[in-house]
Image: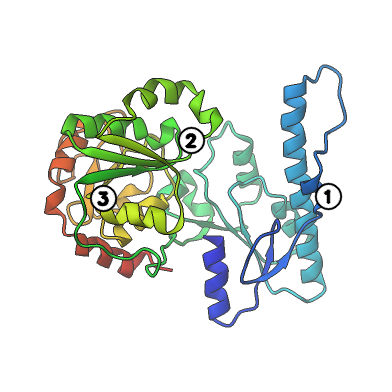
Amino acid sequence: MARKLVSGLKKKGHSVIWFSAPEETFAILVEGDTKLLNKDLKIRLLQDLGPEIRSQMSLFGTKMYYEMDLLTRAYNMYMHGKLDILHVFHSSFGHLAHFFEELTGVPTLYTLHDPMPTEDMLEYWLFERFPKQRFLSISKSQQGKLSSHFFGNVYNGADINEFKFNRIPNDSFIAVGRMTQEKGIDIAIQASRKANVKLNIASWISKNVEISEYYKKNIAPYLNTESIKIFNLLSGSKIVSMYQKAKGLIFPLQWEEPFGLVMIEAMACGTPVIAYNRGSVSEIVRDGLTGFIIDSDIKVMKGSGKWTIKKQGIEGLVEAIRRIGEIDRANCRRHIEKNFTI
């Protein structure tokens, strides 16, 4: 999303400087000290610090120092008149820019991507510490009880030139996302088996995933069949092709997803979304028009009971799968063109 933002700003005539690790970009790239990336640096060996903890703390320290270096370069450029505003497009509240902004007064915008912290988290203290800074959410549900702290809300978007419309799918469904319990891919498998439909799964299967209890117990036993196939998480034209060919995206979230890009990517291709009513789903999917919203049988959320399909949980997903032909794929495309384009 950050790359798309840079591209869009450039097209509008703005000069953009990208502070990041080395990568391709349309902007002027400013890197941090690459010594931190090219060497396996360790923190000082402390008493009673085991090798695994030391390794994890070293990785965290490397990331923190690299970001401190980048941030210092950015604020120095502002102080020398080379920047007008800083936009921290970061996935965490724990960014040092909050402190830098308070010290310098440099106008800074923060786009937040994570769910709001609870009161027992360090990030909650940080959010309360800087209530007047310019925070942007990516959905209104993400703001939660802290909506008064937000400067505004800007939804993510899809490039409709990349995600092209396809009117006629094949007979399979798709599930996309990280292989974690939060994404609910195991539930998508259960629903597709119960509905007796084919399911293609696009996810990243790392060694850590393969040895996880979640994967071994809930995913692996159902693979390598004619009806359920898994593909290592794809990108570019390959994932677009999977979206285009699918009758529907099954997205039974188990957490409060702040946005969920896969939903708008699928709908841009004309593919309806079947999703649990969690997080931002009801802001993105138009129930009965671009897909079906299903109440989870675990948690009561805003809007519960008002959806087209009254059954909950897996039974609701199964009914939605069987009724997917009621959704006009052209409506899905139009919905994204009108509300979620870049």
Q: Which residue is identified by label 1?
A: 35
Q: Is residue 256 above or below residue 54?
A: below
Question: Of helix, strand and loop, which one carries label 2?
Answer: loop
- The C terminus sits in image quarter: bottom left
Given residues 237 and 13, the one toward you in this image is: 237
Three-letter code for the amino acid on which mark 1 is drawn: Lys
The tag on residue 205 is 2
x, y (%) of residue 289? 19, 57
First reached walking from the N terminus: tag 1 or tag 2: 1
Task: Quadrant for residue 61, please give it.
Answer: top right
Question: Of helix, strand and loop, which one carries label 3?
Answer: loop
Cα–Cα gap, marks 3 and 2: 21 Å
x, y (%) of residue 149? 54, 53
Given residues 311 and 50, the one toward you in this image is: 50
x, y (%) of residue 257? 42, 44
Kindly identify the residue that appears in the image at 56 percent across and 64 percent down. 3
Q: Which residue is identified by label 3?
A: 246
Three-letter code for the amino acid on which mark 3 is drawn: Ala
Given residues 109 and 21, the one toward you in this image is: 21
| Left or right side of 48 for 323 | left
First reached walking from the N terminus: tag 3 or tag 2: 2
Kindly identify the residue that appears in the image at 53 percent across and 34 percent down. 206
Three-letter code for the amino acid on which mark 2 is drawn: Ile
Cα–Cα gap, marks 1 and 3: 45 Å
Question: Of helix, strand and loop, which one carries label 1?
Answer: helix
Report the mark closest to the observer, 1 or 2.
2
Q: Work out whether residue 174 can be spotted.
A: yes
| Left or right side of 159 for 49 | right
